[in-house]
């Protein structure tokens, strides 16, 4: 639970939950304090595996934003960057505007089947697996 206190130097936020260390931070604006408290609350809920929190987060982030983060953080560490970059570009073209929470496995399977039909990349499903299974996690 977040507790807000107005002080001389701004707004102090304390976030307390049983079994978890108390977090405290001071902000100039109350709006900034509230935003930080909400961010911490969602982050902690996600760490506990709260599906609702993850779903709320997925409704605020687009596929394109996640791909940009992946390209800047993970892609430079990979061999064969050109091939991976072209596959990411195709994913962005199809799903970039979607929020993560709105992308269904049925949509991805239909897109994969369409790509295989036009033979744009005959081993697409095999090449998409490393992107999805490398243990990289986007930060929101």
Image (tube, rainbow, N blue to C red):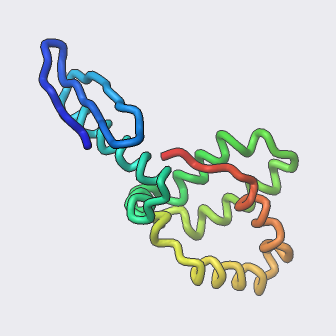
All told, the count of numbered labels is 0
Position in image of residue 39 (x %, y %): 36, 43
Specify the farthest residue to the top.
8
Q: Residue at x 49, y 58 (%)?
A: 49
Position of residue 97 relative to residue 77, above or below, is: below
Specify the farthest residue to the front.
19
Q: Which of the two residues, 4 or 95, is positioned nearer the viewer here?
A: 4
Q: Which of the two residues, 63 or 19, is positioned nearer the viewer here?
A: 19
Position of residue 96 relative to residue 125, above or below, is: above
Position of residue 7 relative to residue 110, above or below, is: above
In-image side of 79 versus 15 (left or right): right
* The N terminus sits in image quarter: top left
**Is residue 39 at least partly visible in the picture?**
no
In-image side of 27 versus 6 (left or right): right
Q: Which residue is drawn at 82% across and 56% down?
A: 83
The image quarter in which residue 50 lies: bottom left
The image quarter in which residue 92 lies: bottom right
Position in image of residue 135 (x %, y %): 71, 52
Q: Which residue is drawn at 24% across and 39% down?
A: 2
Position in image of residue 9 (x %, y %): 18, 13
Position in image of residue 8 (x %, y %): 13, 13
**Is residue 5 at least partly visible in the picture?**
yes
Q: Which residue is drawn at 56% across and 52% down?
A: 66
């Amino acid at each position: 639970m977040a507790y807000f206190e107005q002080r001389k130097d701004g707004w102090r936020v304390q976030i307390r939950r049983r079994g978890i260390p108390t977090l405290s931070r001071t902000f100039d604006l109350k709006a900034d304090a509230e935003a930080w408290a909400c961010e911490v609350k969602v982050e902690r809920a996600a760490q506990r595996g709260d599906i609702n929190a993850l779903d709320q987060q997925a409704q605020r982030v687009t596929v394109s934003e996640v791909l940009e983060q992946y390209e800047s953080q993970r892609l430079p560490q990979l061999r064969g960057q050109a091939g991976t970059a072209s596959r990411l570009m195709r994913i962005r073209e199809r799903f970039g505007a979607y929020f993560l929470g709105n992308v269904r496995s049925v949509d991805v399977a239909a897109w994969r089947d369409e790509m295989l039909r036009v033979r744009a990349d005959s081993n697409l499903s095999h090449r998409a697996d490393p992107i999805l299974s490398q243990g990289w996690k986007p930060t929101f």
